Amino acid sequence: MSDQAKFQKMLEVLLLLDCQYGRTIAELSERFEISQRTVYRYLDTFKQVGFVIENTNGYFKIDKENATVQEISHLLHFSEEEAFILSKAIHSIEDTDEIKSKLVNLNKIYLYRMTHVDNIPHILEYGITHRNSPKANKNYISIGDSSLIDNRVSTERNITNGSEEIIETIKIGDFIPFYFGFRTPMLYVIQNGFNGVIKREPNEIIYCVTNVQHVIENDLLFYFSDGHTTNKEFTKIFNSSKISEINNIIDFEATKFKYWKSDSDLDLKRRKEAEFLVKDDVPNSCILGYICYSESVRAKLLKLGINEKQVVVRENYYF
């Protein structure tokens, strides 16, 4: 195992130790497919770099009551948990180590899934369900391009992680796609009724929002692409092993552009439509919140029982 892989594995163990009741050695060993001896060695390493590891009847967890963590959280605008993990990890690495530059705050990488407002009650009960799911919404209102959706069902893509080697092959229709940004070309088509798509008003369209970290914590299988996944010529697709390199793979500046026609950058539209693909259903517990166009729609969502902090109005997310 390379040094970077070991470091990533140790960070993952640290994240799992950040819990209320603790984890057993056997649980950690099985979860990360490492020996119990290796788990103990990791715990010793954590102690050596300054972590306080609590052991209650064989259940291990990290003590986060630390003034340094609180201070760093305030200064860097990370949550307490993020600051805790990152500060300890970063200070335990040599200044020359390139891994420092590859640390990614996955809580800050947001994912957006558009849906019709009338689909929200079903989502609140069952989550975002795949069309083939036993929990699929029988009254689902589609707002996308049906020809494109049907094409995705049978479209196979090779997972290469940016190399020439084919690691595996997937059908993109088996996944629920999210975008990394808003005001997408597809939204433009939907709001204008182009390509045979039923024209929808902004008040009909809701963004379901999550982030990469939430997807990982919900143990969902995922892949991500550096452009629209149906573009076989230029778009590359990556598996979860490359998530630590996502900032170097996704052109996040492109995903933020309001428009995508550029004589100097003919590839901008493809990169703006980079996707995050989640296998099967996305549980409601994975959804952080909802974005809508107006206060009237927000009031409608709040009547469904959604916490007011989870619904925000963003007119600039629409055309």
Image (cartoon, grey):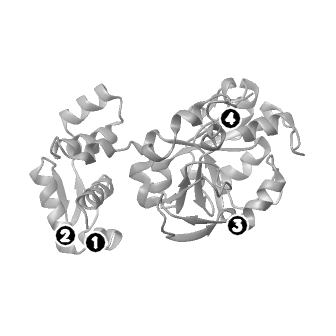
Expressed as whole percent of the image width and height from the top left, the position of residue 56 reads 20, 61
Residue 25 % position (x, y): 24, 69
Mark 2 vs 3, N-terminal side: 2
Q: Amino acid at mark 3?
A: Ser
Residue 38's tag is: 2
Q: Which residue is mark 4?
A: 302
Q: Amino acid at mark 4?
A: Leu
Q: Which residue corresponds to the image point at 66% horizontal and 57% vertical from the top-left?
A: 126
Q: CA distance from mark 4 to mark 2?
A: 48 Å
Give yes or no for contact between labels 4 and 1 (Cβ–Cβ under 8 Å). no
Which quadrant: the N terminus? bottom left
> Which of labels 4 and 2 is toward the front?
2
Query: From the viewer's perspective, is 202 left or right of 12?
Result: right
**Mark sitting earlier along the chain (2/1):** 1
Residue 49 higher or lower than 70, as above or below: below
Rendering coords of residue 231 (x, y %) = 67, 54
Q: Are marks 4 and 3 in contact (CB under 8 Å)?
A: no
Mark seen at residue 29: 1
Badge 1 or badge 3: first in the primary sequence: 1
Label 2 crowd (10 A; few <14 / some 14-19 / many >=20): few
Q: Which residue is mark 3?
A: 133
